[in-house]
Image (cartoon, rainbow, N blue to C red):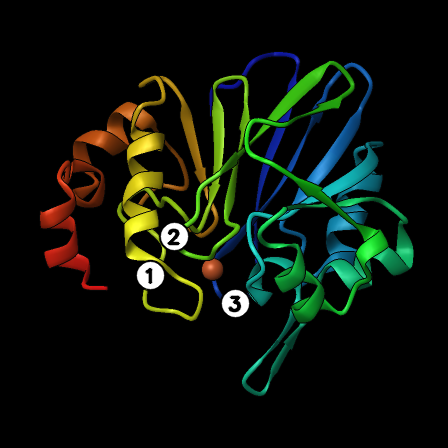
Amino acid sequence: MQVAEQLIVEQIQIGPMQNFAYLIGDRATREVVVVDPAWDILGLLGMIEERDYKLTGALLTHYHPDHCGGSFGQNTVEGVSRLLEHHSVPIYANEHEAAGVKKVTGISDSDIKKVTSGQKLKIGDVEIEFLHTPGHTPGSQCFRVKNTLISGDTLFIDGCGRVDLPGSNTDDMFRSLQQLASLPDDTLLLPGHNYSAVPHATMGETKRSNTYLKIKDPETWKMMMGG
Ligand SMILES: [Fe+2]
């Protein structure tokens, strides 16, 4: 993948649901954040240690247990609460998602740093911008770092996140996808799951092939997605 020289961007497929976790950081200072740590916390921490990176935080795209840990059905997935047992770092969640993160993972208010859309976080000299992209969940967010976009379950290369789940909203998803479609074509899209033939693609490629991004009017969207 083509990323700026200064950037650390590592895409890590993890767990049985084809999730992607990411390490994002500054190659000069070796500071990194982990995006959506779940399924195998010791494995992720081992990678960070092996590469001599310094973990300074965890960023959550949304509160579903396959991205941040927690229980669903009979399954329990390890995530940020396990991470905090080993590393006391802030957990960054959108302001509209913090309550959900707390409920699903069991971590406390003081562990969570609530962020708003447009807010920026510096990791060494690398700036990460938080973009609120509701739809899949009320506080879903994407992370923009130079010419890369980590899109969680908002946008996949061939699709978008489900909008038939509790807390989902089809109208919000439409607006969020329109917002992402306005990003430059050379933006590298890094999704939250490995659901496509390729693990990443440019925004230009995605705009040409992704049916959901091609819909430009809310009526057609509603007809297709319901809600
Ligand atoms: Fe999700």
Q: Please indicate whether residue 60 sits to the left or right of residue 174 in the image.
A: right
**Is the residue at mark 1 in contact range of ligand 1, meaning its CB lies under 8 Å from it?**
no
Amino acid type, mark 2: Gly
Q: Which residue was labeled with disc 2?
A: 135
Q: In which quarter of the image is the C terminus?
A: bottom left
Q: Where is residue 141 in the image (x, y as percent from the top left)?
A: 52, 43
Q: Mark on residue 139?
A: none
Label 2 residue SS: loop
For image coordinates 45% across by 52% down, the residue present is: 193
Which amino acid type is marked by label 3? Pro
User: Of the residues under marks 1 and 3, which one precedes in the sequence?
Assistant: 3
Q: Which residue is drawn at 56% across and 13% down?
A: 4
User: Residue at label 1?
Assistant: 163
| Percent of width and height locating residue 91 | 75, 47
Q: Which is nearer the eye, 86 or 2?
A: 86
Estimate the x, y position of residue 41 in percent, counting from the top left: 75, 58
